[in-house]
Image: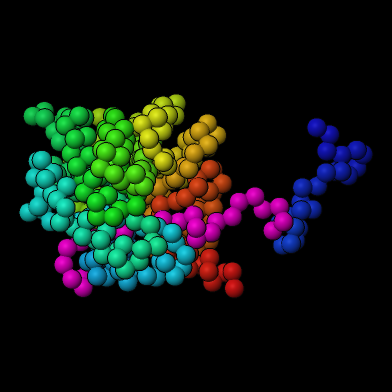
Amino acid sequence: MATGTGKFPRVRPRRMRRDDFSRRLMRETRLTADDLIQPVFVMEGRNRAEAVASMPSIERVTTDLLLKQAEKLLKLGVPAIALFPVVASSKKDNQAREAFNPKGLVPQTVRALKKNFPELGVITDIALDPYTSHGQDGLIDNSGYVLNDATVAVLVKQALSHAAAGADVVAPSDMMDGRIGAIRDALEKAGHIHTRILAYSAKYASNFYGPFRDAVGSAASLGKGSKDSYQMDPANSDEALREVALDLEEGADMVMVKPGMPYLDIVRRVKDKFDVPTFVYQVSGEYAMFMAAAKNGWLDERAGIMESLLCIKRAGADAILTYFAERAAGWLKAGSR
Ligand code: PBG
């Protein structure tokens, strides 16, 4: 690897970096609004918004206000939103019955969104944690262990109720075994052949979900409970490939790695091995870190956020769920003029 003869280097990578025109010509990755999905927190009621303390600038909103945000997102070119419900504690029980109520908050919100903005993709979360009195993603036995097959049966009902309401994509985030296949079979049988499944395939038992659990109000229910018996160990990487392979075999249309920035090695391995639509969730804790640093003046908010999203894409993500979607799409739009 001789980079030069005699006195001067022959190869000077800096030549291409010198000017904006050549930097632009050799740029390998570009972020566009097409890459972004906005996660949103929706609650019952009318014309109300509540701040989420650990997620500055993010609010829980009622469906009518969500429609306004949806319109903005559409105008900015964001293709889809992901719905997360804030469920009143009076509607939580140990069977998660509200999870498959066809008149529940999620089906109602899906109907309103699809009626007003049919072109906006609507993704719903399939998991029981917003609906269980104990905050786990599934049903539990007397020892607190999350039961796999009994939970899958409820997840199937939940997915069917969302598909019937018009959800374009159901996204199981629960990490039960066999849930993708069970949901796929049930959707086909019910005639929902166009409903896509975005599988949270490599979802880690991460410490970065704290602010989300505050936002949906599952933190208090969960208490000191852990999700280690179903979400993946952050130490593992081969296991992520196995989870992805299983979900694809069972009929997933898209797979997801979650969280984002600390797990980009997993994203790259998944993308290289499977060549399928691979999504990344830049989670609430990542959002909180950026906002805390920006608020203290320790990071340039816009530049830092845009770099993080670009890097997630460079690692292999085809799309990114990020609480920054609306802001990033706005910056992209302003920048392209
Ligand atoms: C629950 C769910 C979680 C997130 C999305 N769906 C939290 C958890 O698993 O405890 C986290 C998202 C985020 O932190 O932004 N099924």
Q: Quadrant of residue 259?
A: top left
Is residue 235 something that shows in the picture? no
- Based on the picture, tell me whether residue 68 belongs to the magenta stretch: no
Q: Residue at x 35, y 66 (%)?
A: 117
Q: Residue at x 50, y 45 (%)?
A: 317
Position of 108 with respect to 175 (left or right) is left
Question: What are the residue bounds of the magenta stretch?
Answer: 24-50
Number of numbered discs visible in the structure rendering: 0
How far from the left and from the top, in percent, is residue 14? Answer: 76, 51
Quarter of the N terminus within the rendering = top right
Is residue 267 something that shows in the picture? yes
Q: Residue at x 40, y 66 (%)?
A: 73
Position of 175 with respect to 27 (left or right) is left
Question: Camera-side residue: 130 or 6?
Answer: 130
Question: Camera-side residue: 282 or 14?
Answer: 282
Position of 322 with respect to 216 (left or right) is right
Q: Residue at x 13, y 44 (%)?
A: 96
How far from the left and from the top, in percent, is residue 222? Answer: 17, 43
With respect to residue 77, does 207 lie above or below? above
Question: Camera-side residue: 110 or 151?
Answer: 110
How far from the left and from the top, in percent, is residue 35? Answer: 49, 54
With respect to residue 142, does 3 lie above or below? below
Question: Camera-side residue: 227 or 140?
Answer: 140
Can you name the residue that lies furthest to the right here? 6
Q: Quadrant of residue 135?
A: top left
Q: Quadrant of residue 337?
A: bottom right
Colour treatment of the image = rainbow
How far from the left and from the top, in percent, is residue 38? Answer: 38, 58
